[in-house]
Image (tube, rainbow, N blue to C red):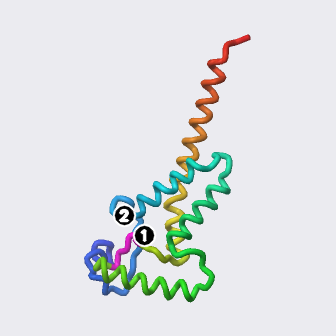
Amino acid sequence: MPSLTDLEGDNGGSEYEVVVVNRKIDPALEELIQIAHCVVLDCPTTEITLLIQRLAELVTGHLGGPVRDANIILAKWMERSLELRTSLHTTVLPIGSLRVGLSRHRALLFKKLFPNIVVSTRNLVQKEETSKQKQISMTPPK
């Protein structure tokens, strides 16, 4: 397999195709991360199942909606992939630029967004606990 540098220099004609997950070079991915963070702020911290569901809906919505027929989504992916490879002149595709995704692309995006949600949730829980501790410590003894 060629190196990432070699693939980045390829003008889209390689038999390889790489989906890269790097928020430094992918503004659309950064935007998705920010949206995921807003979802965290909008959900109760005790509802992790709801957070996971909303994150899955975000990923599904970004990557072409629910998959009802794998053959149709594969055809859409092949068409979109060719368009991106041609327009970007490379076989290295930023995940944020994808508007159609196969299960592997959806899993990658979910995996990238999920740690951000977990960290944000932990921060919210810690803030709530700190706030409760302050309230307890500020209550005068009887």
**Residue carrying label 1:** 95
Instruction: Kindly report the distance in space between the C-alpha atoms of the residues bearing marks 1 and 2.
Output: 8 Å
**Left or right of 83 in this view: 62:** right
The residue positioned 34% from the left and 59% from the top of the image is 24
Nearer the observer, 125 or 1: 125
In magenta stretch: residue 74: no
The answer to which image quadrant residue 140 occupies is top right
**Residue carrying label 2:** 26
Magenta region:
91-97
The residue positioned 59% from the left and 31% from the top of the image is 130
The answer to which image quadrant residue 142 occupies is top right
Contact between marks 1 and 2 (CB within 8 A): the answer is yes
- Amino acid beneath label 2: Asp
- Amino acid beneath label 1: Ile
In magenta stretch: residue 96: yes
Residue 71: percent from left, percent from top: 56, 88
